[in-house]
Amino acid sequence: MKSSSTICTLTGPRAAEMMALFGLFFAAFLAATLIPAQSEAGLAGLIWAEEHPVWLLLVVATLGNVLGSVVNWTFGRYLAHFSNRRWFPVSPKQIERASGWYRKWGFWSLLGSWLPIVGDPLTLAAGLMKEPLWRFLLIVTFAKGGRYIVLAMVVGCH
């Protein structure tokens, strides 16, 4: 009989598979926050490696990216009064620009949440503008998941 510590330990190929998925999740999460990062190369590499089902990679990347955006939404919703502090991750000028875009286009502007440079401040502006979380999650998941699906289709054509 195996000891419980042996049963609960992942080793070999399973450990590598789990670490790859965790790495993808973490990269996608960071890429969606206000920290400069990107996840597309990691997703493309894992698709090319063909060691995971593409649908699983898409779910993991989308989940990580959407949860990272929820961090931004939370910053906007509950921590915006700290925006003039040096440690706050977005400048007042960036907040004003994103808020102006958000005022002009409303919640539909969240369809651009996948875009580099403007997408992350948009998700912060959504929190600032008190966008309901349910609608935020719906639109951001559609936009970010759609971006990963398009990337998977392009990468799959190698």
Image (cartoon, rainbow, N blue to C red):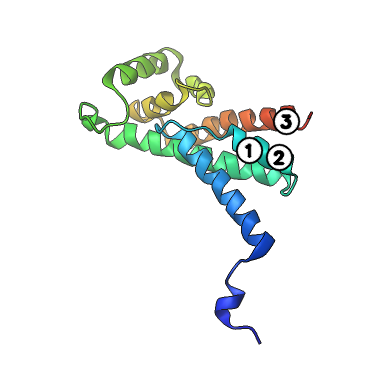
Residue depicted at x 40% and y 33%: 35
| Residue kind at label 1, given as amino acid type | Leu
Q: Quadrant of the N terminus?
A: bottom right
Query: Which residue is disc 1 drawn over?
Result: 43
Give 4 or 102, whichever is nearer the viewer.
4
Residue depicted at x 49% and y 24%: 110
Q: Check if mark 3's residue and mark 1's residue have beta carbons within 8 Å.
A: yes
Q: Residues within 10 Å of mark 2 (few under 14, many from 20)?
A: many
The image position of residue 11, as x and y in percent, is 63, 66
Query: Which residue is disc 2 drawn over?
Result: 47
- Picture layout, residue 19 above or below residue 117: below
Determine whether, in the image, residue 81 is placed left or right of residue 28: left
Mark 3 secondary-structure assignment? helix
Residue depicted at x 63% and y 38%: 43
Q: Quadrant of the C terminus?
A: top right
How far apart are the two marked residues, 3 and 1, measured between alpha carbons?
9 Å
Give 24 or 128, whichever is nearer the viewer.
24
Mark 2 secondary-structure assignment? helix
Q: Check if mark 2's residue and mark 3's residue have beta carbons within 8 Å.
A: yes
Label 3 vs 1, first from the N-terminus:
1
The image position of residue 97, as x and y in percent, is 35, 15
